[in-house]
Amino acid sequence: MKKFQVVGIGNAMVDVLARADDSFLAQAGIEKGIMQLIDMERAVTLYGSIGPAREVSGGSAANTIAGIAHLGGRTAYVGKVKDDQLGAIFAHDLRAQGAVYETTFAPKDAADETGRCLIIVTPDGERSMNTYLGVTEFLTPDDIDEAQMADSEWLYLEGYRFDGPDSHAAFAKAIAACKAAGGRVSLTLSDPFCISRHRDAFRDMIQNDVDLLFCNRAEMLSMYETDDFDAALLRAADHVAIVACTDGSNGAHVLAQGARWHLPAIPITIVDATGAGDLFAGAFLWALTHGFSLPDCGHIGNIAAAEVISHIGARPEADLTVLIAQAGLTPAT
Amino acid sequence: MKKFQVVGIGNAMVDVLARADDSFLAQAGIEKGIMQLIDMERAVTLYGSIGPAREVSGGSAANTIAGIAHLGGRTAYVGKVKDDQLGAIFAHDLRAQGAVYETTFAPKDAADETGRCLIIVTPDGERSMNTYLGVTEFLTPDDIDEAQMADSEWLYLEGYRFDGPDSHAAFAKAIAACKAAGGRVSLTLSDPFCISRHRDAFRDMIQNDVDLLFCNRAEMLSMYETDDFDAALLRAADHVAIVACTDGSNGAHVLAQGARWHLPAIPITIVDATGAGDLFAGAFLWALTHGFSLPDCGHIGNIAAAEVISHIGARPEADLTVLIAQAGLTPAT
């Protein structure tokens, strides 16, 4: 038995959540509903203009790994924070959830700080993310422990982390170590704009390395530069063994082995959309590594996504194992 | 017109909120429902043992001042934080709420950090607080701007801040400046254990300086070392012009000018009791400085307390002005 079911690699950061209406977004020049990269200066200015906020650990893949740990999966996370108070908060919350997080903290005198994401939540529950990457940008191959990668059934790679100079090499090292030991690779496309920045790199990885692709409808369309969603799904399914594509209030689509399943969304009032895709992926991977059928993996992903968007913050608050049991879902094997 | 309606002085800190059951409290040696002072070492150990947490600005008087600012009152806060990430969060949240916070940050190389309060919320909504004071302990007369104190209708003093070597002198300086300019002084007793540490100092201040006393039932009984609640209320009313005493699910009692009012609590399910007394005081002071009758001040205090205990965190989330208007309350003058 491998030590880990899933090891995730991504941008480590703390979310700073504040509420505002759409006019604030316009005034502050924030593009609604997407992730935009900002520098420290902009982060300080923007922070000064938002209302009272709350701080919770975030980071897309870190949310996914926290979800797997919450469900009882054996999981670890790789992503850089600094030896500062926000870095300590990030590390604590991941470990307290039960995930392994063996990291080298960037030193106290590093020029950059622990990354943070200023998330403006509008009354419709949509989140507009403003990311100061900080030290998490500087993930290098040195941060990858090949033994850890080899000791995991699955690798989970965050598309956002393509935005760093040495991170492609870090991903390549992790993939090689995991695959050489019989492990499989999953990838989340993260964001349509992230895809447009790195489409070639994503395409290469999907065609050569990825066994399970996570994305949402907008990302799928952006990836294949088409308006034809079904065609894009089929093209993705040509390259990877499993496609798991979320579709907002329309739920999720899973394609594998020539089959296709549509899993309707769990009806819920959206309070804060942050983390929906992250938790879908986490619960899907947990279910996949615990013997559930592929459509049930999608159903379980939907359950986790619905829970996390029903409250502020991108990590589960209710006990997901209870929600899954209440839905009558049990492993197929 | 004075620049400020209320200036508050207290322990500046960030709350670290985590959920746990009663058995965790027993195991960790945490006394339930009260505030206990801990050192940095204990703070680190305890933080390592709690589950995933969320960080929100706190501090008893700071919550009160945030409440007044939220309601549109002219208000300022005095309390020390360090020039670190948690200090920046504290300052931001207070200013973003509309309060004035002109502070000298303790320097980056100070031995202590910004104070924090590890709050364990049990399933019954009760909070058990573990306070690492950090730099907030070192409030001195130098931190008191006499012109600011003179320019406020009311001073609001946090009893917890009696736990610092130079803070009695700081309070005395603030009181003298405020009173000399015709201002009035309010005090919250904060905590029964805090009272037992400083009963003489509290008594002197109540008899000589305090015009409005905030406390809850347990604090009132502790202050006058009696089991007779009504007798204690009357003794307090002998010394101060207004007594505003909260009484848990029984609401609040207001005594002034020989009269006594009982204001029933707003029925609510308690999610997190943190901040109930703080927001009662904030809304009461706001109402008092905006022409509401004394019983309506108590009623408005109850409305704010009910709002803040209906969610995690000690600062208002719903619009309190709307809740007050919905209750049909309008100024008497």
Image: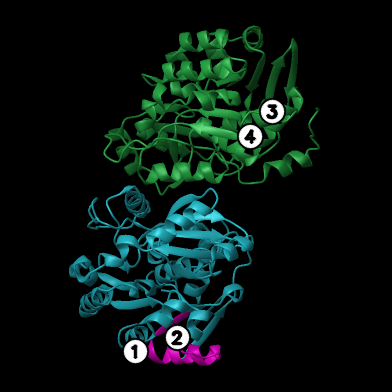
Chain colours: A cyan, B green
Count the marks: how many? Answer: 4
Above or below residue A11? Residue B315 is: above
Q: Is residue A80 left or right of residue B188?
A: left
Taking the image as drawn, is residue B294 in sight?
yes
Give the Cα separation between the discs numbered 4 and 2. Answer: 50 Å
Q: Residues within 10 Å of mark 1 (few under 14, many from 20)?
A: few
Q: Give the foreground label among 2 and 3.
A: 3
Q: Which mark is residue B289?
A: 3
Secondary structure at numbered mark 2: helix
Q: Residues within 10 Å of mark 2 (few under 14, many from 20)?
A: many
Q: Which mark is residue A207?
A: 1
Above or below residue B102? Residue B204 is: above
Disc 1 to disc 3: CB gap under 8 Å: no
**Residue B3 occupies quadrant:** top right
Q: Is residue A236 magenta?
A: yes
Q: Residues within 10 Å of mark 4 (few under 14, many from 20)?
A: many
**Range covered by the magenta-colored residues:** A223-244
Q: Chain of mark 4?
A: B
**Residue A247 occupies quadrant:** bottom right
Which one is in front, A159 or A62?
A: A159
Q: Residues within 10 Å of mark 3 (few under 14, many from 20)?
A: some
- Give residue B150's position: percent from left, percent from top: 56, 23
Give the Cα separation between the discs numbered 2 and 3. Answer: 59 Å
Residue at label 2?
A223
Kind of residue at disc 3: Thr
Of pointers 3 and 4, the one earlier in the residue sequence? 3
Q: Which mark is residue B305?
A: 4
